[in-house]
Amino acid sequence: MATFLLIRHGDNDSLGKYLAGRKPGVHLNESGIQQAQNLAERLAHYPIKAVISSPLERAQETAAPIAKSFGLPIEILPAINEVDFGEWEGKDIEVLRKEPLWEDVQNRPGQVRFPEGETLQEAQDRIVEALVALNKRYAKNDLIVCVSHCDVVRLAVSYFLDISLDNFQRLVISPASITLLSFNDQKPRFETINYTLDFPEHHE
């Protein structure tokens, strides 16, 4: 009955430009590196038991300062890897907007299989299975950091809150944000969703 800090990786230069997916070599930029350090400082006084990460560089780089501050190794868990976007991986967002499948991805994502990739249902199944298995591994009140990706966190939240896959994109999960998932004797619950250390800029 552990508690999980589901953390989205920090900023990188792909955000808003192209769909990084599982493309190797996507690293945190200067802003993302600072976000990762800020997270480590913010969590330094909490009793973190383990640090787990997606295999991708940007996730591991976000996890690294946290793991270092506790003298813990980073456990790589493929089950919390980014969604497999198949042929869409690495493509420019503006190019993808012109694809016939784009409208379905935006409005009916629960019914979409990415070309040569996976469905969101398949992704959600592996993510939830991994979290349930991790919960069984750790003791009550253990605090576990899991660094992953926007859609991975959104899919976990939507499952445990019974949100339809067609509506999961309404959830906002910002870079370097923390979503706190607690397992207990009854149903899992979220004490915090998308907590960020910095408030977004206010625009009139």
Image (cartoon, rainbow, N blue to C red):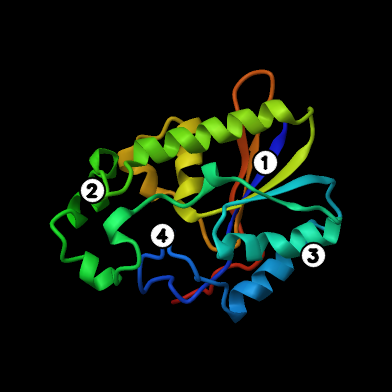
Structural distance between the alpha carbons of marks 4 and 1: 23 Å
Task: Calculate the distance from the C-alpha at mark 1 to the C-alpha at mark 3.
Answer: 18 Å
Q: Nearer the viewer, residue 89 or 108?
A: 89
Residue 121, quarter of picture: top left
Q: Callout 4: helix, strand or loop?
A: loop
Please, which residue is most extreme toward the bottom here? 30
Q: Earlier in the sequence, mark 1 or mark 3?
A: 1
Label whose residue precedes the other's in the sequence (3 or 4) = 4
Separation (CA) of disc 3 from disc 2: 39 Å
| Gap in angstroms between the C-alphas marked 2 and 1 | 30 Å
Residue for point 57% across, 65% down: 58
The amino acid pointed to by label 4 is: Gly
The residues tagged by marks 2 and 4 sit, at their Cα atoms, a distance apart of: 20 Å
Depth order, front residue of 45/33: 33
**Type of amino acid at the residue the image marks with label 2:** Asn
- Image coordinates of residue 36 in percent, x first then y, are 68, 67
* Foreground disc of the pair 4, 1: 4
**Which of the two residues, 81 or 108, is positioned nearer the viewer here?**
81
The numbered disc on residue 41 is: 3
Determine which residue is flagged by label 4: 21
> Which residue lies at the image location 69% right of the left edge and 18% below the top edge?
185
Q: Earlier in the sequence, mark 2 or mark 1?
A: 1
Q: Which residue is tagged 1?
A: 4
Please name the residue that numbered disc 2 is placed on: 107
| Residue 69 visible here | yes
